[in-house]
Amino acid sequence: MNGFSSKAIHGVSLKKDIHGALRFPVYETAAFEVGTARDMELVFEGKKAAHAYSRITNPTVEDFEQKIRLLSEAFGVVAVSSGMAAITETIITLAEAGSNIVTSPFLFGNTISLFKTTLKRWGLEVRHADMTDISSLDKIIDEHTRLVFAEVITNPQLEVADFSKISAVAAGRNVPVVLDGTLTTPALFRSKDAGIAVEIISSTKYMSGGATSIGGVIIDNGVFDWRKNPSLAADAVKIGPGAFIMRLRREIHRNLGSCLSPHSAWLQSLGLETLALRIDKSSANALAVARFLESHANVRNVNYPGLSSSRFHATAKRQFNGKFSGLLTFELKSKDECFRLMDSLVMIRRATNINDNKTLVLHPASTIFADYPPSERARMQVNERLIRLSVGIEDVEDIIDDIRQGLDKL
Amino acid sequence: MELKVNGEAKSVSADPLSISDLLKLFKVEMPDMVSVQLNGTFVDRPTFGVTLIKDKDEIDFLYYMGGGQ
């Protein structure tokens, strides 16, 4: 059983259900009885493998984690309550006050806020490097750098860096690369093959099966020697490759309390079964929509890594096996035109999520980037003429017809 | 050999016996996810194959990926 969908559907059964249920049950319980008082002591010492409390582990959540582990061929996975929780837990595990992290200036708005506001107050320095310029990355890493953070396809700039090159530079400086792989998931991009140490994913998006629930996953690909991370070095000598996952599970995840609910884990396990089908359809639809937009007289330009006009096309094509995910942007003449188009759409919905089954439209400058001054927005390549489209899995003719009728009215 | 594994007395006939052998003998699931203490001291993972168990040793397997076994 080697195929992605076969593995996603059949997964791994750690424990057979007593009734033979083919779908792993939802264990909606806070606590588990583990036997004798001595058994309980062993569980708390970590010497007996059993679930004790659902903030730390839960069978339904574990089933979801093991499926992700199988699909990404990773060392270990921890599922958490959101994509932002996944980023927060990972940074707190690997970095400390007085250290720095190196990131792209192009990141999801809440990630920027987490780094530049929340974690800054706790003494973490954030440095910016152009991830598409390897020499800039190499120059900015120093002995206090704890990780390099990047997004697989930046949103909404749609930049795609060469992650094997980034990993090679970071490895040369003994620094792990943490990648937000939400837009590709292991269905399009196996980050392990590119040397990525940790992949974090907002499972709310493609993975959840259609915006069913909020969640996140932290994937340790097992390619980084944690003895090189000052925060984990002592543990890694004793524990070996499990040092990162063990610190997460036994300290950070446990203490922060950002646990994924069993019901959300169940929904997202269901989503995994159709992940490859949906991401393929979303990618194919996005390419057709991008080509249509390029041909329309009222559209000033289109940005999508699947188009040969994108300067990231060749890199994206090679890394993501000829598929480019479902996110694209395009520009009209003015903010007023953007709003008129958005309000004229009939099937396409105005909403802030991405990678839903539904096609969603958003005006980034007035919504997710509204808190940033114009100069900052300009630096992030977000202008008032820009529309972001997250292309869903509807019939592509209907998506294009909806956009065409709106564009023709401008 | 008479051993104490995770606090329980166990009799094992194999000798010599390394930590890697012990992980197999006790059919520990996902052995990559287990760390090992020998007489109270963590054993470096690269030495699992060459660290030999002696009579009366106390071995603790520490699990950290959750339960399920």
Image: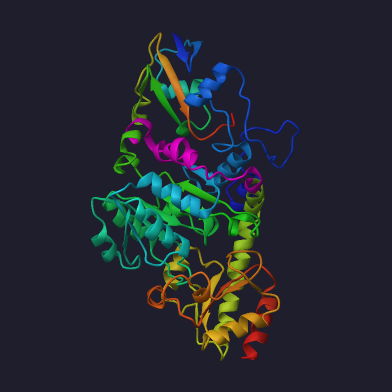
The residue located at (36%, 18%) in the rendering is: B52
Q: Quadrant of the N terminus of chain A?
A: top right
Q: How is the image coloured?
A: rainbow
Residue A260: quarter of image: top right
> Magenta stretch?
A236-265
The residue located at (58%, 59%) in the rendering is: A205
Report x, y in % for residue A61: 60, 42
Which is more toward the observer, A168 or A321?
A168
- Residue A269 to residue A249: above or below: below
The residue located at (64%, 43%) in the rendering is: A262
- Left or right, A160 with respect to A64, comes to left
- Left or right, A320 with respect to A196, comes to right
- Residue A4 to residue A333: above or below: above
Report x, y in % for residue A103: 36, 60
Report x, y in % for residue A242: 42, 37
Q: Is residue A223 visible?
A: no
The residue located at (52%, 54%) in the rendering is: A83
Question: What predominant SS class does the magenta segment belong to?
Answer: helix
Residue projecting furthest to the right: A19
**Magenta segment: does it hold A258?**
yes
